[in-house]
Amino acid sequence: VEGFSTEETAKIVELSIPAVKSRLRRARAFLRNELNQIFSEGINP
């Protein structure tokens, strides 16, 4: 996705532009939550 516009990404993955935006928003929220959990719990080897 990096380096591509939303429109280009939609064409590549054969989804509508709103669907791409929605999936990106959900993916970012998921990643944010995962990273927050990791950093709030500390890193345990």
Image: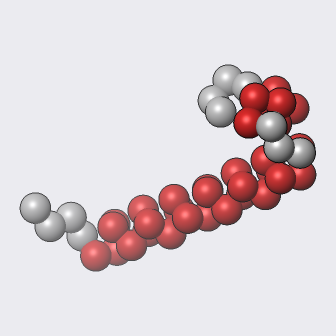
Residue located at (83% from left, 30% from top): 11
In the picture as drawn, the residue positioned furthest to the left comes out as 45
Task: Say left or right for 5 vs 32.
Answer: right
Task: Say left or right for 21 vs 25.
Answer: right
Residue located at (78% from left, 57% from top): 22
- Please count the marks in the image: 0
In the picture as drawn, the residue positioned furthest to the top comes out as 3
Residue located at (51% from left, 59% from top): 31
Residue located at (28% from left, 76% from top): 41
Quadrant, the N terminus: top right
Q: Is residue 6 visible?
A: no
Residue 15, located in which quarter of the rendered image?
Answer: top right
Q: Is residue 38 visible?
A: yes
Measuring from the top left, give residue 34's x and y in whole percent: 44, 66
16 over 43 or under it: above or below = above
Quadrant, the C terminus: bottom left
Residue 40, located in which quarter of the rendered image?
Answer: bottom left
Task: Say left or right for 8 vs 28.
Answer: right
Model colouring: secondary structure
32 over 16 or under it: above or below = below
Measuring from the top left, give residue 18's x and y in whole percent: 89, 52
Task: Say left or right for 7 vs 34.
Answer: right
In the picture as drawn, the residue positioned furthest to the front comes out as 14
